[in-house]
Image (cartoon, rainbow, N blue to C red):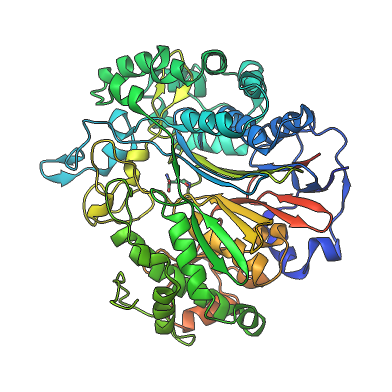
Amino acid sequence: MAKTFHRRHFNQAIAASSLIGSTLGGTRLLAEENQNAESDQSNRRTAIGANVAATVHPIASNAAWKTYRDGGNAVDAAIAAALCLGVVDGHNSGLGGGCLMLIRTQGGAIHAIDGRETAPAAASEKMYLRNGKPVAELSQTGSLACAVPSQIAALKLAHDKLGTLQWASLFEPAIEAAENGYAIGIATHTAISSERENLSNYEASKAVLLKPDGSVPKIGEVLRQPDLAKTLKNIAKYGPGWFYAGDFAKAAIEYLDQYSGILTLQDFGNYKAIERTAVRTHYRGNQVIGFPAPSSGGIHIAQMLNMLETFDVANIYTNSKAEFFHLLAECMKRAFADRAHWLGDSDFVDVPKFLVDPLYAARLARQIRLDKASSNIAHGIEEANADKKHTTHLATADAKGNWVALTSTVNTTWGCKVMIPGTGVMLNNQMDDFSISPGVPNAFGLVGSANNAIAANKRPLSSMSPSIVLSEDGTPRLSCGAAGGPKIINATLQNIVRCIDLNQPIDTAIASARVHQQWRPDIVYHEPNLGGLRQPLNENGNGRNEVTEQLSKLGHPLKVSSSLAIAQGIQMISRGLLAATDPRTDGKAIAS
Ligand code: DON
């Protein structure tokens, strides 16, 4: 029987997380039976059971629950939930975007399914230059920002290999949500409000997401998406061919052409999800499985864990929380310097293997001083002997031992803001994840090198980091992942470190305040109440507590941020599987 406990407000959760050593040991949080997961739309932060799922929206989590009820496995549940999120959380992910899917099967196999968008064949390094100057707006909004959508190809590949229920049946909850509508929550309302102007430039985006007078629908109003329901029905019935070579591709090209788009029918027809070899690293007696290029997540999480393994992290945390966060920030800085220089689509550039070599990490770790922030960090080389939210992460795992960590995105809020009329599909703006020009930061402030330059049919570098941790004998222990651009990498790192080094349950790890350092700019972003200590407010809302005071003394420029990434996770515990959603948003964990 599934056990759950109610949502707590984020700040309470952060404060609580440092007090509650273990949710499972201490159980100071209330538990109750999850009698009717399917119809229950309330928010539940955790659930324990044999088959579990955690997503950012109750309707999507309930879709996973229904899938388990119908005999489906974790792969089926992840697909049904991802399709639903595209309807009820469409500013983050959907059919117009892409995803990375990491799967551990009941037989112990690992599948890393790369459903990353690709640049059109006509894309080039100069496509965002006007009068020789980069125009970032072009890679973020409108027809040129869009790469070939790829989510559905990845979901189909996963289903063909590992799904057990009928493909069409997995679409039912999503179709129902699109047809009958869902009550607009704070996330959708905020996403529409923040992009109202851009959305109103495109007829379908405007007609579907805004009211006839151009205003933003209120929280609680029902959003129906009949065109999206039709699209989902067609893909359910005819498969991805309808999307890539049929009516959808034709409608998309015809519409984008009106806005000088460069995508072609061939671009759509050529798209393929690719199976990659996962990144494997060892951390304190565990195997950490991460996503390889074109994601930077798996590589840099491995690199940072390798650095951290040379420190007694648990002891450092016990003695000084400031030193713990300082150490994390120093590892992040070095990893992101390497990311900016070395990373790109491995089908186009050589992503060096030394980045995940423990000897290289040890060399970087030796440069870290625990009493001082370092400056002038540059990317490493091999030695001869050496406040925006978009994207979504969901986690499922079943009684048989199938685990799925799936991160899906249209990139920034509502992608490129262009919805294809008659289809309900909002297109991504994943082209902005390329380095549009050397040294020019993208929407996340990330800079890149030639390795992540635009090229025809290339996949832009990603930070998405679906991760699965196994014991050395291969037993699954933990899965983590997040939304939040580059913050994904660091949030996932912190959740792994908290579970492994600090022995925290995944829900405590997820709720705890985080830090984020991405090399450029040289700032340690931190959430309020870092280290579980109340942060007094000054007139800028940015007072210091003992931990941030010490971080500042160590030499870190600091900036408070109300939320650094939204994470979901699953952990194997003695009573079954524990699924947890992030208290920073209104998600839900289910169990059956
Ligand atoms: O793949 C990436 O790294 C980005 N497109 C992810 C975007 C994201 O997480 C947005 N969330 N704030």
The spot of residue 455 in percent (x, y) is 23, 41
Q: Is residue 365 left or right of residue 265?
A: right
Residue at the limit of the structure toward the left, as seen here: 131
**Badge count:** 0
Residue 502 seen in the current view:
yes
Q: Residue at x 53, y 82 (%)?
A: 550
Residue at the limit of the structure toward the bottom, as seen here: 371
The spot of residue 249 in percent (x, y) is 37, 18
Quarter of the rendering occupied by the C terminus: top right
Q: Nearer the viewer, residue 516 or 298?
A: 298
Q: Nearer the viewer, residue 217 or 342?
A: 342
Q: Residue at x 32, y 39 (%)?
A: 431
The spot of residue 31 in percent (x, y) is 87, 51
Query: Is 123 above or below relative to 180?
Result: below
Residue 586 seen in the current view:
no
Quarter of the rendering occupied by the N terminus: top right
Residue 263 image-quadrant placement? top left
Query: Is 590 above or below relative to 72?
Result: below
Query: Is 231 above or below relative to 294?
Result: above
Q: Residue at x 27, y 44 (%)?
A: 136
Residue 200 image-quadrant placement? top left
The spot of residue 527 in percent (x, y) is 56, 63
Q: Nearer the viewer, residue 518 or 70?
A: 70
Q: Nearer the viewer, residue 538 or 547?
A: 547
